Amino acid sequence: MMLMQQLDFINVAGKEGVFAPYTEHDVRTAVQHTVTLSYGVVTNITPDIRITFYNAGHILGSAIIHIHIGEGFHNVIYTGDFKFEASRTLDPAVSRFPRAETLIMESTYGATPVQFTRQESEQLLANYIKQTLERGGKVLIPVPAVGRAQEIMLVLNHLFSSRMIPEVPVFLDGLVVEATAIHAAFPSYLGKELGGRVEELGNVFMSEYFTAVKSQQQRDEILNTREPLIIMATSGMLEGGPILTYLKEFASEEKNTLIFVSYQVEGTLGRKLLKGVREFPMINEKGKTELINVKLEVTKVDGFSGHSSRQQLLSYLKAFKPKPKKLVLVHGEPDAVMSLAKSASKVLPGTRIYTPQNLESITLETRS
């Protein structure tokens, strides 16, 4: 997965004239020096530091890291990106550890409560798709190749099989198909129920509804068709990838819909469109800047993100065992971090909470 994504970044950067800070040789060299670890395996990385990986529920193979320093000197839990809720793809993040003095936790959605349950989110997605298809429109779903793409594929399979949306072709473009094959190759890292199905039946993500886009000719045929359809393509934030080709072609028709199902970082085209921007520049085939007028419907469906919602972050703190003495909130926009810190102080009375700035240092004490 790591190799696939990094090589794709270099390829896309080259096509778009963007400087890549490393080469294909650098990537392959890094992979050669990579040691993979399974969940739950205690590994010495120095004579006095041991690490253990636990399921983070974010994407395939994502890990929460337990860092054990010395013989009981200090234990740090670093969540990285994590999801404290079962999805169709993965089990929820682990919340119980042998020891923990300091918890370093992401805050991506620290200020953003999710308004809908998972079932309601799937129903809302079905409604948007059904309305668009019934008026003869096309549905564009930007997705990261890893994680959200496979989750939405499983959701669409369910919506088709339960007749909640009309049966139309779904075209997969970008690295979605390759990433999906990797998911099917590692069933032990999927949720228990899904992993069992994959072990028994193989790649259950792909079905008769999905078609991989493998050539420019095939892409051109999709761009020229007048039939209703669904397109899932990278990138999830509209910062590159084939989704921009489809958006350019279909943006001008009001009957079409652009549906975001993952987080949109501030400053990205995806975030700008959600904020109401209805014109954006694109470089055309001749290398000239072209202004794209957006008339299609733009919406989002929360609940599919690989990050924990505000409610799930607070639930994680309640479920986390043992209670940490220090909580360090990172990986969030300032308002999200500060909002979460305020609420976390009520969930973890007596725990010291930090909201560090970049390059700020925090001292970790021994266990008392």
Image: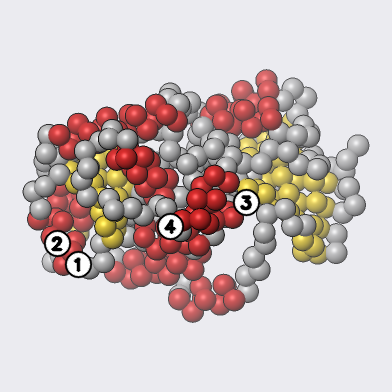
Amino acid bearing label 1: Gln
- Pointer 2 local density, CA inside 10 Å: few below 14, some 14–19, many at least 20: few
Residue 229 image offset from top left, x and y in percent: 19, 46
In terms of image quadrants, where is residue 186?
Answer: bottom right
Measure the alpha-carbon separation of dots 1 and 4. Answer: 26 Å
Give the mark nearest the N terminus, 2 or 3. Answer: 3
The answer to the question of whether label 1 and label 4 lie on touching residues, with beta carbons closer than 8 A, is no
Amino acid bearing label 4: Asn
Q: Which residue is mark 3?
A: 63
Q: Secondary structure at mark 4?
A: loop
The answer to the question of whether label 1 and label 3 lie on touching residues, with beta carbons closer than 8 A, is no
Residue at x 52%, y 76% (from the top left corner) = 28
Q: Nearer the viewer, mark 1 or mark 4?
A: 4
Q: Determine which of the numbered discs, if any, sits on residue 203 in the image.
A: 4
Measure the alpha-carbon separation of dots 1 and 2. Answer: 6 Å
Residue at x 84%, y 42% (from the top left corner) = 365
Q: Secondary structure at mark 3?
A: strand
Q: Residue furthest front?
A: 200
Q: Toward the viewer: 83 or 87?
A: 87
Residue at x 42%, y 53% (from the top left corner) = 204
Q: Secondary structure at mark 1?
A: helix
Measure the alpha-carbon separation of dots 2 and 4. Answer: 28 Å
Q: Which residue is mark 2?
A: 220
Residue at x 68%, y 54% (from the top left corner) = 39
The answer to the question of whether label 3 and label 4 lie on touching residues, with beta carbons closer than 8 A, is no
Measure the alpha-carbon separation of dots 3 and 4. Answer: 23 Å
Amino acid bearing label 3: Ala
Give the mark nearest the N terminus, 1 or 4. Answer: 4
Residue 247 image offset from top left, x and y in percent: 20, 49
Give the mark nearest the N terminus, 1 or 3. Answer: 3
Q: Is residue 201 left or right of residue 342?
A: left
